[in-house]
Image (cartoon, rainbow, N blue to C red):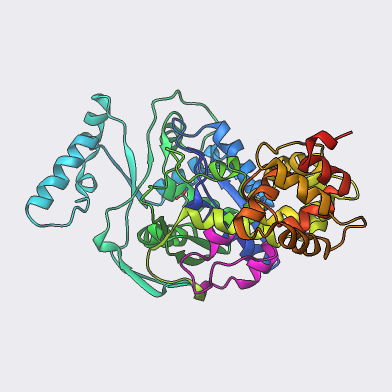
Amino acid sequence: MPVFRFAPSPTGYLHIGNARTALWNALMARKTGGTFLLRFDDTDTERSKPEYAEGILEDLAWLGIPPDRIERQSDRAARYAAVLADFQARGLVYPAYETAEELDRKRKRQQARGLPPVYDRAALALTDADRARFEAEGRQPHWRFKLSGNTVRWQDGVRGECHIETASLSDPILARAGSGKVETGFPSELAQKAMTGGQVLYTFASVIDDADFGITHVLRGEDHVANTAVQIELFHALGANLPQFAHHNLIASATGEEMSKRTGALSLRSFRAEGVDPLAVAIVATLTGTSEAIRPLAGLEALGALLDLSKFSRALTKFDPAEITDLSVKLLHAKPFGLLKEPLAALGIAGERAEAFWVAIHGNVSRLEEARDWWALLMSPQNFAVAETDFLAECAELLPPEPFGSETWSQWIAAIQAKTGRKGKALFMPLRLALTGREQGPELKAVLPLLGRAEALARLVPARRS
Ligand code: GLU
C-alpha cells in the first residue's frame, strides 16, 4: 500500500507553496488507495511551536485533506539516539569539533582558492588525545556521516534519471551534542548526549522516519534534490528500502511576494480570512506549473483525477494570487443552489424565496456573505427613492398587475417608454435606484418578481407604503 507523507516543520503557518506539496501527497495517496501521513519536523525546539502545529492541522482540514496518520519527530528522540549509537558502533559517523566560525573560515579559504566549499574531513584525522583535549576545553562534538564518494543514482518520479557525486558534497552533520545530563536507558552515552539538549538534524531524522513509517513515496519540492543523494546513502546505511523519490517544481508569486512560513505571506489562513473557497486555493496550488489549465472543478476528487507526476513542468512557475480569488468567485457562481442551501440559511437567507433570490443575485457577489446585504436590500421593506419622484410615480401607474412573471419587466418597460419617451440610462437608472438602492446589481427583470407588486409600488412612491 502506498504511503505518502507531508513533513512541515511547525515554525509558521502553511503558505501556498506548502499547500502544493501537501495536496499532491494527499491526493496521490487518495487516488492510489494509500495513506497520507503528516509528520511534524519539530526537532528545532526553539523555532517549533505547538500553535503552529495546531494551525497546520486546521489548514489541512480547511483544504479538505486531513491526514490519515500523524507523527512528531519530537516523540522519537530515543529512536534517533539508538540509530546514532548504531552508526557510531559501525564507524559510519565521526565526531567533529569545529565551531561555526572555524567552518566559516575554512569555507572562505576554499572559495578564495576557487575550490568548492566542501568539508575537508579534518576531523577524521583527530587522535584520541585531540578529542580528549577538545572535550576538556568544553567543546561538544557534532556527528558527521561519512559519505561514500560514489555517484548516487535514482529514477526521479518527476525529473527522470538523476545522479549526484557524493564526493562533491560535505559529509552531513546528523546530530549536534547537547550538554544535558546523562540518563540511563539510552543506548550510548555519546548518543544520548547528542539528543539531550542537542539536536538531531533534519536529514537524519527524516530518513529514519521514512524508513520506520514505511514511506513508499517521497514527493517534495525540488529544493530537496541535493539532499536526496545523502538520504539515499543513509537509507542504505539503515538497511532500509528506498522510497520512490519525486521532486516537483516550485511556484512563486508573480507579484513578487516572497512565500514564507515566517512572515505569513500568502498563507492559507490569509486566504481563509478573505473568505476564499479552499477549493480555489487547492486548484491553483496544485495545477500551477503543470500541463493542466487552472479552471473550476467540481471538487478535490476531480482535481485528484487530473494528477500525474508526468504533468509537472520542470521550471519555476509564477502564479498571481488574484487567480485564486478569481477562481473562488467562478466556483461560487457555478455552484448549484442545493449545495448552498445550508450555508445561505446560516446567513439568514431561507424560505421559499431563497432559491429565486440566489438565482437573481449570485452573479453580483464574490463571496457568499455578500448575499446577506442583497437579502436585506431586496427582501425587506425599503425606501431609496430621493429623486425623479414624478417619473417614478408615472412608472408606478404603469406597473402591470400580478402575477409577476418573466415577461412582466419587458411589458412594463415598453409601457413606460411609450408614455414618457425615455430610454437607456435615463429610464433604467431611476428605476434601479428606487427598486434596489444601488447603481449596480442584479437584473431588474429578476428583481421585480422577488419584490412583488406591493413592495415595488411602495419603493417607487414611498407615500403609498401602507
Ligand atoms: N521538513 C522538511 C521541509 O519542510 C521536509 C522535507 C521533506 O519532505 O523531506 O522542507
Along the viewing direction, whichever of 326 and 29 lies nearer the viewer:
326
Residue occupying the point 58% across, 53% down = 212
Q: Position of residue 454 (x, y in %)?
A: 88, 44
Q: Residue at x 77, y 51 (%)?
A: 395
Q: Nearer the viewer, residue 276 or 229?
A: 276
Number of numbered discs overlaid on the protein picture: 0
**Location of residue 140 (image quadrant):** top left
The answer to whether residue 135 is left or right of residue 262 is: left
Using the rendered image of the protein, determine whether residue 214 is visible from the camera's viewpoint: no
On the question of residue 376 being in view, the answer is yes
In percent of width and height, residue 222 lies at: 40, 61
In the displayed structure, does residue 331 sit left or right of residue 323? right
Percent position (x, y) of residue 386? 67, 36
Q: Which residues are magenta?
A: 283-309
Residue nearer the viewer, 351 or 17: 351
Which of the image's four quarters has the N terminus? Answer: bottom right
Q: Is 364 one of the magenta-colored residues?
A: no
